Image (tube, rainbow, N blue to C red):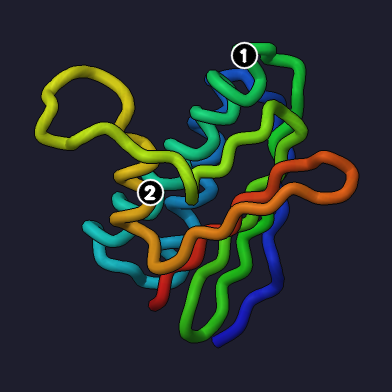
């Protein structure tokens, strides 16, 4: 069963993470994902968006984050676009998960949860992260 892409554009204020999580929860429910898969997927999207807010936008809460979620029969694609500082999560080295301290595991979590993570910068300087989860 294919669905039309779902678009959401929010300002980069942390309070909008709840709206993003709620939307992702609705989508995972519609796709009938297990509670564990749904929670992991929501966490990965939350991590990417919160990192954009914190690091890409340096906590400037007036900037925009755009999400396009495309549920398909065999996979779920989430495209997240921002115009903050460039950061390629595919070349970044996350800290060792056994090193117990707060922070620094977002990239590790996203890469563990998603089947594919792609990063690109457009000619206009916009950062695009595509997360793909096989269903």
Residue linked to disc 1: 58
Quadrant position of the C terminus in the picture: bottom left
Q: Residue at x 22, y 58 (%)?
A: 36
Q: Residue at x 13, y 27 (%)?
A: 99
Vertical side of 94 occupied by 4: above or below? below
Q: Is residue 135 left or right of residue 51?
A: left
Label 1 sits on a secondary structure element that is loop
Instruction: Give how far across and how far down residue 74 sits, in percent.
Output: 47, 84
Instruction: Give how far across and how far down residue 115 sits, in percent.
Output: 39, 68
**Quadrant in the picture for residue 37:** bottom left
Tell me if mark 1 has few (under 14), some (14-19) or many (20+) residues whose alpha carbon lies within 10 angstroms of its own. Answer: few
Instruction: Give how far across and how far down residue 19 sits, in percent.
Output: 55, 35
> Gap between marks 1 and 2, in whole Å?
21 Å
Q: Residue at x 56, y 66 (%)?
A: 77
Quadrant position of the N terminus in the picture: bottom right
**How many numbered badges does the structure rendering display?**
2
Vertical side of 63 occupied by 37: above or below? below
Vertical side of 20 occupied by 130: above or below? below
Q: Residue furthest right?
A: 124
Residue linked to disc 2: 110
Q: Is residue 129 left or right of residue 121?
A: left
Q: Residue at x 37, y 39 (%)?
A: 93
Q: Nearer the viewer, residue 108 or 17?
A: 108
């Amino acid at each position: 069963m294919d669905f039309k892409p779902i678009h959401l554009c929010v300002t980069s204020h942390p309070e909008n993470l709840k709206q993003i999580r709620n939307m992702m929860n609705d989508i995972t429910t519609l796709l009938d994902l297990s509670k564990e898969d749904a929670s992991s997927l929501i966490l990965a999207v939350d991590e990417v968006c919160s990192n954009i807010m914190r690091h890409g936008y340096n906590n400037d809460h007036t900037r925009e984050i755009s999400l396009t979620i495309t549920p398909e029969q065999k996979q779920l694609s989430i495209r997240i676009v921002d115009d903050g500082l460039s950061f390629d999560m595919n070349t970044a080295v996350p800290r060792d998960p056994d090193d117990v301290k707060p922070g620094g595991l977002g990239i590790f979590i996203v890469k563990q949860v998603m089947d594919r993570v792609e990063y690109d910068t457009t000619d206009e300087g916009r950062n695009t992260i595509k997360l793909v989860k096989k269903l």
